[in-house]
Every structure is written in structure tokens, then in C-alpha cells.
Image: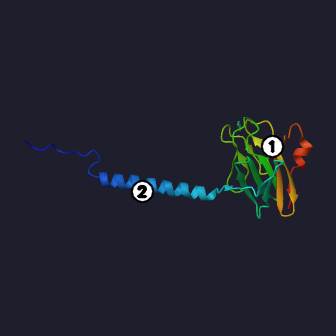
Amino acid sequence: MSEPTKTSHCGGDCDTGRRGFLRDAINAAVVLAGLATLAPLSKLAALEVRPTGTVKYPIPATDSVSIDSSNEVILCRFGGEIFAFALSCPHQNTAIRALPGTKGFQCPRHKSKYKPDGTFIDGKATRNMDRLHITREGNDLIVDPNIAYESDTEPAKWGAALVKV
Ligand code: FES
């Protein structure tokens, strides 16, 4: 009995095809890794959570965005001002993400976009990102995650909720 004839569906170039696939997969992984390094979202750990519920953070040394997931605070230093934002989108409470660098924010659910100071640009949301009460204490910032200012109902407090550096 003779062996069944092996047929090639790739014209005898299967190894090259597999290698090409692997090469493409590796290239894609490198590109993704590069994108990840373009958008470092540094995690922020509170220096202290006080009995009053306020949270202490060090003043960021440069323009940057940091996220404290456990206290649901986004801290953004941009253009000589520091803002603390509620992590949840004002539209339907989805966790907001930062665009690479300090280019602002975008909600992953309905794509609402915001400037670095939280001002609404476009999308389904109907107001700016909610700013949290923030003050300076020496070289630290004190943020109260329980006091959020909404730009449509408290525009003056929303506008004043920042620390100048
Ligand atoms: S939940 Fe953010 S835009 Fe809808």
C-alpha cells in the first residue's frame, strides 16, 4: 500500500507563511508595546487618607495625569494648574481614561471628550468632568473625593476648584 500523497495548499511555502505570520505577530506586539509606552498612565497612591475622608497627594513635579483608582480620583497637572477629577464620567459613570500625555480625557463608553482642565469638548455628556474639592497644604494636595462640583449646577465652585503652581 502506498503512502497518501501529501499536498501543499501553499505552494510549498508554508514555512515562510508561518514565519511571516509570527513575524507579523511580533511586529504587532512591538507596535502595541510602543503605544503603551506613549501613554503611561501612572498610578497614584495616596500619601494619607484622613478620618474626614480627605486624601493627601504629593504635588506632581511636571505636567502629568495620575489615577488613584482606590479613591476614584484623577489628578491632572496642566499649564500651571492642578485639578482633581472624579473618575466617573458625568454621563453614565463610566471610568474616564486619559489620552496620551496631557491631551485630555475620553470616556471609553460613548466617547465623550474633555480638555485637560475637564472642559467638555464633544460626545454624549452634557457637562464638564466633575471637579473635586482641592486645596494645597505645604508641598501636598488635599482632595476631598466626597465633594464634587458639577459645572452646570455650581459653575463658580467648579471654576475655582484648582490649585495654582
Ligand atoms: S458614560 Fe461617558 S459618555 Fe456616556
Structural distance between the alpha carbons of marks 2 and 1: 45 Å
Answer with mark 2 or mark 1, whichever residue precedes in sequence: 2
Residue type beneath disc 1: Asp
Instruction: Using a 10 Å C-alpha cutoff, classify the residue at mark 1 as few (fewer than 14 neighbours), some (14 to 19) or many (20 or more).
Output: many
Residue sitting nearer the eye, 50 or 97: 50
**Ligand 1 position by quadrant:** top right
Question: Which residue is depicted at the point 73% across and 41% down?
Answer: 88
Instruction: Using a 10 Å C-alpha cutoff, classify the residue at mark 2 as few (fewer than 14 neighbours), some (14 to 19) or many (20 or more).
Output: few
Q: Position of residue 159 (x, y in %)?
A: 89, 47
Which residue extends farthest right?
156
Within 8 Å: ligand 1 and the Cβ of disc 1? no
User: Helix, strand, or loop for circle 2?
Assistant: helix
Quadrant where the image shows the N terminus: top left
- How did the renderer colour the structure? rainbow
Q: Which residue is mark 2?
A: 23
Quadrant where the image shows the C terminus: bottom right
Q: Is residue 65 above or below residue 91?
A: below
Determine which quarter of the picture holds residue 157: top right
- Circle number at residue 130: 1
Residue type beneath disc 2: Arg
Question: Which residue is depicted at the point 65% across and 57% down?
Answer: 40
Question: Which residue is depicted at the point 75% across and 36% down?
Answer: 91
Q: Position of residue 44 (x, y in %)?
A: 71, 56
Number of numbered discs: 2
Q: Position of residue 69 (x, y in %)?
A: 69, 48
Residue sitting nearer the eye, 87 or 20: 87
- Circle number at residue 84: none
